[in-house]
Amino acid sequence: MEKVNDMRITSLVGSMVLAGAFLVIPVGSGAMPRVGVVVSVRVAPPILPVYAQPICPGPGYIWEPGYWAYSDEGYYWVSGTWVLPPRFGLLWTPGYWGFADGLYVWHVGYWGPAVGFYGGIDYGFGYPGSGFYGGYWRGDRYFYNTRVTNVNRTIIHNVYDTNVSHQRESTNRVSFNGGPHGVNARPTSSQLSAARRRHVPMTSEQRQHQRAASTNRTMLASLNHGRSDVAASTRQSLGSARQQGCE
């Protein structure tokens, strides 16, 4: 009966995530930021799959790394994808799983003027575990670091080339912070400050992308054993006019 109740609670909270709501569940995480904590489970998420980044579809798109989400049927993979920000000047802070009080707790990602703490998880492609090195905004133009992002220079001209000292290593694929075998990382003062600033939740396209993954059984870790055939995708959609001309 306890397992059934846990699943019902997880399903309810998962629906809230897809609806874009934010629910903060108090956990004993000390100084760890608690932005958008919405679901907790007892089983650790699988390791991150290794995948190649598809080419950027056009100017203004920002990479959202793939991540493990959770539903009634267990963990499922949400493929990495290129997304349009809600408006100019915003960067994506990826969500992450953190261990607290015997549970693995999901901290939802968000848009903001600076990239905050994402658990020390090495998502790759400009997200080596701390900070962001994939690109930056200059006014209404987004510039791409071609060392860590897959960009066609004949289409996108706002590029630069800066090496990132901490590239992903094949052995560093842990997908959660803290607890047994988790990443040992804590937020810096600037990351804590970023977490306290006003945020913008994931866009409707991002929610649609996660919803599509949740209904695709091939994304379930129990079936793909942590190696999804669709680990990354070019983009969820072509975007829309209300993305304020980011394309």
Image (cartoon, rainbow, N blue to C red):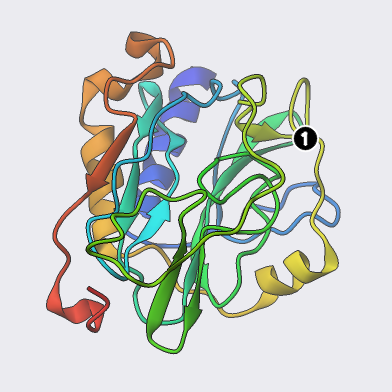
Viewer-side residue, 17 vs 59: 59
Count of numbered labels shown in the rendering:
1
Q: Where does label 1 land, which residue?
A: 101
Q: Quadrant of the C terminus?
A: bottom left
Mark 1, residues whose alpha carbon is within 10 Å: few (<14), some, or many (≥20)? Answer: few
Q: Residue at x 40, y 33 (%)?
A: 8
Q: Give left or right: position of 121 versus 239.
A: right
Badge 1 marks a residue whose secondary structure is: loop
Viewer-side residue, 178 vs 24: 178
Q: Residue at x 34, y 29 (%)?
A: 231
Q: Position of residue 213 (x, y in %)?
A: 26, 35
When the figure is inspected, residue 207 is found, relative to residue 61, above or below; the finding is: above
Viewer-side residue, 154 vs 131: 154
When the figure is inspected, residue 55 is found, relative to residue 40, above or below; the finding is: below
Q: Position of residue 182 (x, y in %)?
A: 74, 28
Q: Position of residue 131 (x, y in %)?
A: 67, 58
Q: Residue at x 66, y 26 (%)?
A: 172
Q: Position of residue 232 (x, y in %)?
A: 32, 36
Viewer-side residue, 199 vs 58: 58
> Mark 1 is on which residue type?
Asp
When the figure is inspected, residue 14 is found, relative to residue 72, above or below; the finding is: below
The furthest residue to the bottom: 139
Determine which quarter of the picture holds residue 155.
bottom left
